[in-house]
Image (cartoon, coloured by chain):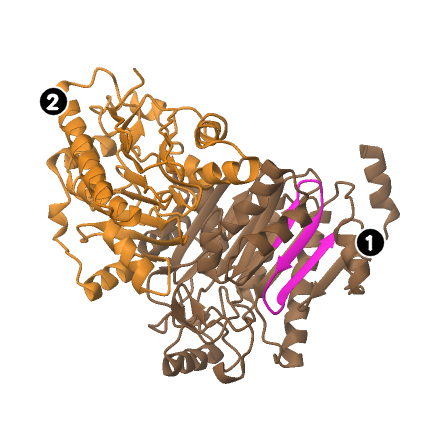
Amino acid sequence: MGWAIALHGGAGDIPRSMPADRREPREAALRHCLNLGVTALKTHQSPLDVVELVVRELENCPHFNAGRGSVLTSDGTVEMEACIMNGTTKKCGAVSGLKTVVNAITLARLVMEKTPHIYLAFDGAEAFAREQGVQTMDSRHFITEENIERLKQAKQANTVQIDFTQPAPSPKIMPEKISPVDGDSQIGTVGCVAVDGLGNLAAATSTGGLVNKMVGRIGDTPIIGSGTYANNLCAVSATGKGEAIIRATVARDVAALMEYKGLSLEEAAAYVIEQQVPKGNAGLVAVSAAGDITMPYNTAGMFRACATEDGYSEVAIWND
Amino acid sequence: MSIKEWEDSVILRRPGEAFVEDQKAGGESERARERESMGGWAIAVHGGAGVDPNLPLPRQEEAKKLLTRCLNIGVSALEANLSALDVVELVVRELETDPIFNSGRGSALSERGTVEMEASIMDGQKRRCGAVSGVSTVKNPVSLARMVMEKSPHSYLAFDGAEDFARQQGLELVENSYFITEENVGMLKLAKEAKTILFDYRVPADTCSAGAGSMVMNGMPISIYAPETVGCVVVDREGRCAAATSTGGLMNKMHGRIGDSPLIGSGTYACELCAVSCTGEGEAIIRSTLARDVAAVMEYKGLKLQDAIDFVIKERLDEGYAGLIAVSGNGEVGYGFNTTGMFRGCATEDGFMEVGIWE
């Protein structure tokens, strides 16, 4: 028992050859966000507050595909989405299609707490953000040079670009490697799960979606039970190819295996990642009410970090 | 069953035999639903859970007639060996096109007085899926959901992007006013006066007692509870399962609100084991990932279809009110609800057919 926290900055085809100048800022950001969450847990903030706080920080970091740094749609715009769930009450909130909201995760929480609904999207979500007075910025705030270049490459390759960290392969290779049909990926999505010493759980996930995604596309992140889920047993945040995660209802299935089959957190998460999702498609971070942590993935790597009350902490990308 | 036996059974049944509306007595239909299937086709449709007990009889008859017609369309299609996926789309299109229930024409109105429809479809065999939200001019949202599944790299499109895609794909489009019925305009007015999100669009707030006294949804007050989302689940002769759900959402809902219907695992789910379509209090269905949980307790706990349905309705809904229909891969059909009534109908290849509203 004791508090525990895990967070991720996306799973995918992250090459081990990734240059240090691209790797180190991301590792530093993960460490910074982890410390923020740990401090909050130590000062007895609720897991719900902690996951929101950490995901806000990850959204503000331009190195990950959420908030500032979100990847661009085929129209060159950002359409962000996020989801938060309180495991104790199973209350949840989600948003999609945000263009100006600085912290999508906070709007998701407001949908949960201030509306009779769970999920608001596009213009209606933007209007709600204004009504609630959350911080908004011109969409230029979210668009980075790197993502403009990435969209250009994706358009040249005529594909939905899958990899967030790798320099785009030449157009000749790209369409064979990633057909538009299976190019449904969310590399760089961010998420956080936390549990306090009393076993209260919460999960939050936020993303910009896919490079060159169709306008209006919704991925797994805002969908309760797919990208995000929490109950009284565990909290889960998933990342990877949205389509694969949705059809496998990844986050709920981790909890369902614990609930219906009596598996441990680690066994349940491993089963979902190894048996229910095709290789190369997904990863997740999860914590249990007892304070266990697991962070499996079946991609080349996953940006991730975790810490527990007994002093364990880890920041990693690959399986070393 | 061997192919020979199957052929014999088909030949032995007189054409049209399964098409007769056959409302059996409770005990008999219960037994029929729970029978061990021989692996033939099975189909169920719903037109929403949570029906006001005072709903005028002519409206009840009208609803049952539509459910029967839709069942018969599905049965004919299954007899003609259409795939489960084709059948659920066909049946839901019919439900969308008829203004009686809350989907397609006859959809509930948002706070702005417009229609924002959503739908999803799932093919159990490969667990492929497609969903749409915020659709305002597409005559049949369920067909757009299928297009998203089959013709786009994504599985879920919403609002302007979904509309653009519909245009690109050449789906039939109509003016938003096509979907708006006079009755719903009146109900929106009532809802606005009552400052509530009005679920039922045909029974005035002060006379509605459905929903077993639930006055709160997701922490906010509501006065009425009777959503009339539509859905269809089918298993075909080859054991392929499919599910589809379509809705106009809640009366007086906020612009941009997404409910459970388009969410895979919540309102709709299909895999090799079963297909499920839910209806009711969207927020409760989402929190309990209701559709996936029917499949999950079958898959992980080894429960049979009807046991799985009873389990999720009893254990998973917390304080929420909802209902669902489901079929299993081996040809069983079942349903469950904790609301006052659910518009539903089901049929199986051995000639069983039931259309009902109350328990």
Graded by Cα atoms within 10 Å as few (under 14), some (14 to 19) or many (20 or more), the crowding at tag 2 reads few
Q: Colour of chain A?
A: orange
Q: Which residues are magenta?
A: B325-348
Q: Colour of chain B?
A: brown
Q: Is residue B259 above or below residue A195?
A: below
Instruction: Please tell me which residue is depicted at 63% across the width and 43% down the height of the picture.
Output: B83
Q: Position of residue B308 (x, y in %)?
A: 63, 47
On whether residue A182 falls in the magenta region, the answer is: no
For label 2, the residue is A21
Which label number is shown at residue B15? 1
Q: Main secondary structure of the magenta part?
A: strand
Say what amino acid the circle numbered 2 marks. Answer: Asp
Instruction: Please tell me which residue is depicted at 70% across the width and 57% down the height of the picture.
Output: B346
Q: Position of residue A154 (x, y in %)?
A: 24, 32
Pick the front one: A171 or B223: B223
* Quadrant of the image occupied by residue B19: bottom right
Q: Is residue B328 above or below residue A267?
A: below
Q: Quadrant of the N terminus of chain B?
A: top right
Closer to the eye: label 2 or 1 = 2
